[in-house]
Image (tube, rainbow, N blue to C red):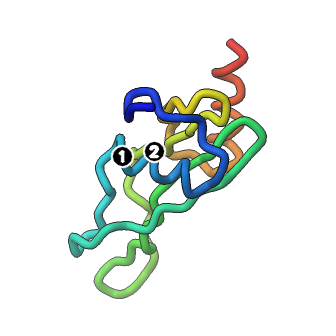
Amino acid sequence: MTSENPAPPTTSEQALDIVRDRYAQPKLPDGSPAELRVEEFDIGYLVYAVFPPVTDTAGRPQPAPPGGSKIVVSKETGETVTVPNYPTETAIALYRKQRQA
């Protein structure tokens, strides 16, 4: 299969490879690559970047900047869909709801 029509993934690593092939690697503030995590669920894999907590100059925690997205790779087709950067379970629920529509 081509990168436009990848084979459906059967492992988290395959889902991660699809995402790395199709999307830019997120970067940390120092320019190094951000860690990517994969959460497997019944109909797909949720892939997202992990960023360190943001603190002010006094070391106090600050809210994460708004925006961003997570990527779902379909187990059935290998297609990718972006979902908002919601907590994991909320992002998965939104993907399920979109698939039913």
Q: Is residue 89 left or right of residue 63?
A: right
Q: Secondary structure at mark 1?
A: helix
Residue 21 — which label?
1
Outermost residue, front side: 1
Residue type at mark 2: give it. Answer: Ile
Distance from disc 1 to disc 2, alpha carbons, whole Å, reads 5 Å
Q: Is residue 54 left or right of residue 27?
A: right
Q: Is residue 48 above or below residue 56?
A: above
Q: Which residue is mark 2?
A: 18
Q: Is residue 61 above or below residue 24?
A: below
In what quadrant of the picture does the N terminus appear?
A: top left
Q: In this rendered view, identify the residue nearer to me: 92 or 76.
A: 76
**Residue depicted at 45% across the width and 63% down the height:** 63
The image quarter in which residue 93 lies: top right
In what quadrant of the picture does the C terminus appear?
A: top right
Q: Is residue 38 left or right of residue 1?
A: right
**Residue depicted at 52% across the width and 29% down the height:** 79
Q: Are marks 1 and 2 in contact (CB under 8 Å)?
A: yes
**Residue depicted at 64% across the width and 31% down the height:** 95
Outermost residue, top side: 101
> What crowding class fits label 2: few (fewer than 14 Cα within 10 Å), some (14-19), or many (20 or more)?
many
> What crowding class fits label 1: few (fewer than 14 Cα within 10 Å), some (14-19), or many (20 or more)?
few
Q: Secondary structure at mark 2?
A: helix
Task: Measuring from the top left, give residue 20's x and y in whole percent.
Answer: 38, 51
Residue 66 — which label?
none
Outermost residue, right side: 42
Residue type at mark 1: give it. Answer: Asp
Outermost residue, left side: 31
Task: Measuring from the top left, give residue 50's x and y in whole percent.
Answer: 47, 65
